Image: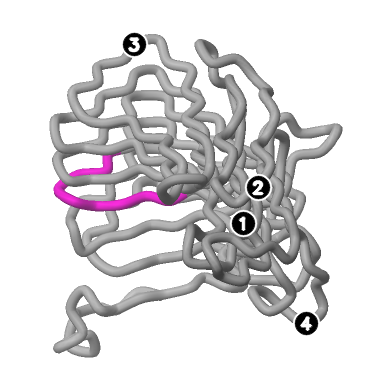
Amino acid sequence: LWFADTKLLAGLGSKLTGVIAHAPDALTLGTLDLTAGQVMFPNEGFTLNVEGDLTVSSDAAWLELGGIYPTNRVGSVTYFCGGKPTRLNVHGDLKVLNGGRLDVRAAMTNGVEAFGAYVTVGGTLRIGEKAKVCPDCDPCNLGAVKFDVRSLAVDAGGTLCADYRGGAGGHTAANVSSLITNREFGYGPGFGVSPYNLVYNGANNYYCGGGGGYGGRGGNSAAQGVAGWTYGLALSPIHPGAPNGVSENVISRSYRGGGLVRIHAGQMTVNGTVDASGQGWAYGGSS
């Protein structure tokens, strides 16, 4: 939607948002410079092609690709991204600068697609000061985002953030929907497990989840929650992190595991932060 001037937008400023709900399966642009507003392309299997540079150029700008809608599907407790991967193809440079943000949410993986989303950059993926690029795994299936770039540059103060973007923690029907049964364990390999009704420190604790595992076992909760098993390689992390089991008590809560930052690049310069931390404290998800 194009306006000849900005009169219709007066007073809205950075509060202007948009969800492109009925975009075509693929959209091709010459260049794209998002200077303000939150723009979302939630379509399952959507492809955005940019023939030149794509720039998210200010702290008032936020571009989101991939599903954002909650669902009653058993196993998806936060986001539902469908089963077709999102694709972002930038033939020039992809620049997220000055506090801008780019989120890419993965779909579920299957026997055909190895990843749930793909980001391909012919030039440089640059993350400037206070800017964020956030790859988000499918919380149930743990489909992940894969980046193929010619070069990566993360400036001081910039962040590649996959924190809290791995497997979802366990839940009860009351947490999500009456259509979903209690699930005392989390999603994905290495999930922590909860014992049911248990008295701990004089309190009635119905769920006390153990921590998620990854390159090693997760943490056992003080209230006898079972830790998640080892999976993956501690020194070569190629999988998203696992969550804890459901916890509804004074000890802890259900937390997502850490996500995955998977980048193939000819050259990397990282002066900022790459974060794939698990969520929470004590018996939360694995990183």
Tell which tag, 1 or 4, sits nearer the viewer. Answer: 1
Q: Say which amino acid is labelled 4.
A: Ser
Span highlighted in magenta in the image: 95-103
Residue beneath disc 1: 208
Q: CA distance from mark 1 to mark 3?
A: 45 Å
Q: Amino acid at mark 3?
A: Gln
In the picture of the structure, the residue carrying the numbered disc 2 is 225
Type of amino acid at the residue the image marks with label 2: Gly
Q: Earlier in the sequence, mark 1 or mark 4?
A: 4
The x, y position of residue 4, in whole percent, is: 25, 78
- Near mark 3 (Cα within 10 A), the count class, few <14, some 14-19 or many ≥20, is few
Say whether marks 2 and 1 touch (CB < 8 Å).
Answer: yes
Q: Mark 1, mark 3: which one is toward the viewer?
A: 1
Residue occupying image coordinates x 51% and y 33%: 260
Specify the label residue 258 is tagged with. none
Q: Which numbered disc, 4 or 3, marks the residue closer to the eye? A: 4
Q: Earlier in the sequence, mark 3 or mark 2?
A: 2
Of the numbered discs 4 and 2, the one sitting upstream in the chain is: 4
Residue drawn at point x = 72 percent, y = 29 percent: 114
Report helix, strand or loop for mark 3. strand
Query: In the image, residue 19 lies at what x, y percent?
Result: 48, 73
Do callouts 4 and 3 mark residues in contact (Cβ within 8 Å)?
no
Q: Judge depth for marks 3 and 2 and give the one in front.
A: 2
Whole-number angstrom distance, CA of label 4 to CA of label 3: 49 Å
Write down the residue under mark 4.
Answer: 178
